[in-house]
Image: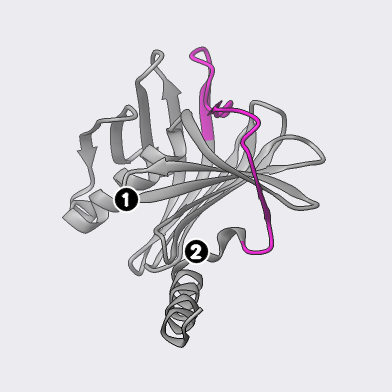
Amino acid sequence: MRRSQILFLIISSFLLASCAVKTVNGFEQKEPVVKSYTVPYFSDTKTDYIYKAHISIYGKDFGGIFIAKKMNDTLYRTAFTTEFGNKLFDFEITDNSFKVNYILEELDRKIIVNTLKRDFMLLLKRNYEVEQEYVNTESTVYKCAAGKRSNYLFFDKATGRLSKLVNATKQKEKILISYTAESDILASKIVIDHKSINLKIELNYLQ
């Protein structure tokens, strides 16, 4: 092989490595066992999912109650209120749509609304098409397409439960959702953490 070809291959390999997201570094890639996956959390139309919530967003902190309700097979209704009952926001969400019924004037900025839209659409998304699968000793990971990004769903091998979701571009992790599962269908604690902006949402399930 000529020197120029070897040099090209070395440079190409370096560029591919430098552009690869670090989410599944050290994992072994394998053929997916499943072609699709449905998230079991927030799946019961008869349940009001009520969480004590804390939102830290662009230097502002809000505490209160977050409620998510599955209205039918495709529609969710979410609301966030203070502990005194004052509404901060009220959204309607499907896999493909987002409607603002109400948002506090202090939060009614395009960058904030768009960020909350992405977060809660990601949190409540149920159905995924699995493109690739990765494994290590502790976790199984499904890689799923998400427009120009990808979603990486991490499952604890010991329990089989969804424990983490990473939303990433080809180069960087953008959003991390971690789940502490109380059962196969209920996450008792959820943390939504952004890697590139100052936003964090913590949800603790109220019995």
The mark that comes first in sequence, 2 or 1, is 2
Task: Look at label 2 and name its amino acid.
Answer: Val
Where is residue 29? Give x, y as percent: 64, 50
- The foreground one among 44 and 82 is 44
- The image shows residue 13, relative to residue 193, as above or below, that is below
- The foreground one among 123 and 89 is 123
Which residue occupies 39% across, 68% down? Answer: 198
Where is residue 170? Give x, y as percent: 41, 60
Q: Is residue 99 left or right of residue 6?
A: left
Classified by dominant secondary structure, the portion drawn in magenta counts as: loop
Which residue occupies 41% across, 42% down? Answer: 145
- The foreground one among 172 and 3 is 3
- Residue 80: numbered disc: none
Which residue occupies 41% across, 85% down? Answer: 4
Which residue occupies 29% across, 34% down? Answer: 90
Return the residue at label 1: 148
Return the residue at label 2: 21
Q: Which residues are magenta?
A: 25-50
Where is residue 137? Give x, y as percent: 80, 52
Q: Is residue 89 left or right of residue 76?
A: left
